[in-house]
Image (cartoon, rainbow, N blue to C red):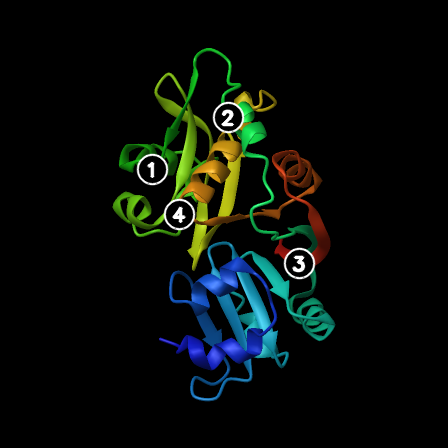
Amino acid sequence: MIDPNKVAPLFAGWNETMIHSYLQGHMGYALVDDEENPSSAQIVSGDFCFFAGVPNDALIERAAAPEIAPQNEEWRRAIERVLGERVKQRFRYAIKKEGDVFDRAQLAAYANALADGFTLALFDESICRMANEESWSCDFCALFDGPADFVARGLGVAVLYRGRPVSGASSYVVYDGGIEIEIDTKPEFRRHGLALACGARLILESLQRGLYPSWDAYDLRSVALAEKLGYRLDHPYLIFERV
């Protein structure tokens, strides 16, 4: 077990919630070049690993997740050289973390705009188990130690149709004072405002509990949804994705 305090200086200034989650002792783990005096490290959280410190080829070969984030240009060049055709580059989009800038009345209107037959429900152990059964929704609770742990530490909102989740927004990770949002909809139920409704409700639930609902966008569609909910784009950033 790597002491997070030994790793923390390498990631100083990197404002990424999944990094904070590990350093604060909530979720994830680290791999380093030297356990006592690390100069290179990767923090692994679910599908993501974050490389910091001095670029290290051996550590890059041990990249432990399919989404690989370099700290800087030196790491980017090293990852490109070491992993070559095993990865491709693409952009994700950082969303500003601006405190409570949300229009709560508008969010409530989005949450209440579901068509007949659809209902919103907070994740309980039963919904966690159902989410774990399907590929589109399995990431909602994946980083927790089972449904009971999610209910104890996490937060999620599902859209139910005939008693089963067809869309959801949940805490992919938790960190001190906040959550990182995971949001998705079953493919055949997309384009009906379901993600907007459960995202709005999750933001309201988070704020009510004193938690900041952090958002990091996979693509420009995710950016558009985030902006409709009240967030603002910060900047695009490059990551590597295993192919």
Earlier in the chain: of badge 3 and badge 2, it is 2
* Residue position for label 1: 128
Identity, as a three-letter code, of the amino acid under mark 1: Cys
- Mark 3 to mark 2 CA distance (whole Å): 33 Å
* Residue at screen point 58% across, 40% down: 102
Identity, as a three-letter code, of the amino acid under mark 4: Ala
Identity, as a three-letter code, of the amino acid under mark 3: Ile
Identify the element where label 3 is drawn.
Answer: strand
* Residue position for label 2: 111
* Residue position for label 3: 239
Identify the element where label 2 is drawn.
Answer: helix
Q: Position of residue 43 (x, y in %)?
A: 50, 68
- Mark 1 to mark 3 CA distance (whole Å): 29 Å
* Residue at screen point 61% across, 71% down: 13
Q: Position of residue 126 (x, y in %)?
A: 28, 33
Identity, as a three-letter code, of the amino acid under mark 2: Ala
* Residue at screen point 33% across, 37% down: 128
- Mark 2 to mark 1 CA distance (whole Å): 21 Å
Identify the element where label 1 is drawn.
Answer: helix
* Residue reaching furthest to the top: 116
User: CB atoms at circles 2 and 4 under 8 Å apart?
Assistant: no
Q: Position of residue 78 (x, y in %)?
A: 69, 73
Residue 194 visible to an observer of this rendering: no
Q: Is residue 178 above or below residue 9?
A: above
Earlier in the chain: of badge 1 and badge 3, it is 1
* Residue position for label 4: 142
Identify the element where label 4 is drawn.
Answer: loop
Q: Position of residue 17 (x, y in %)?
A: 52, 58
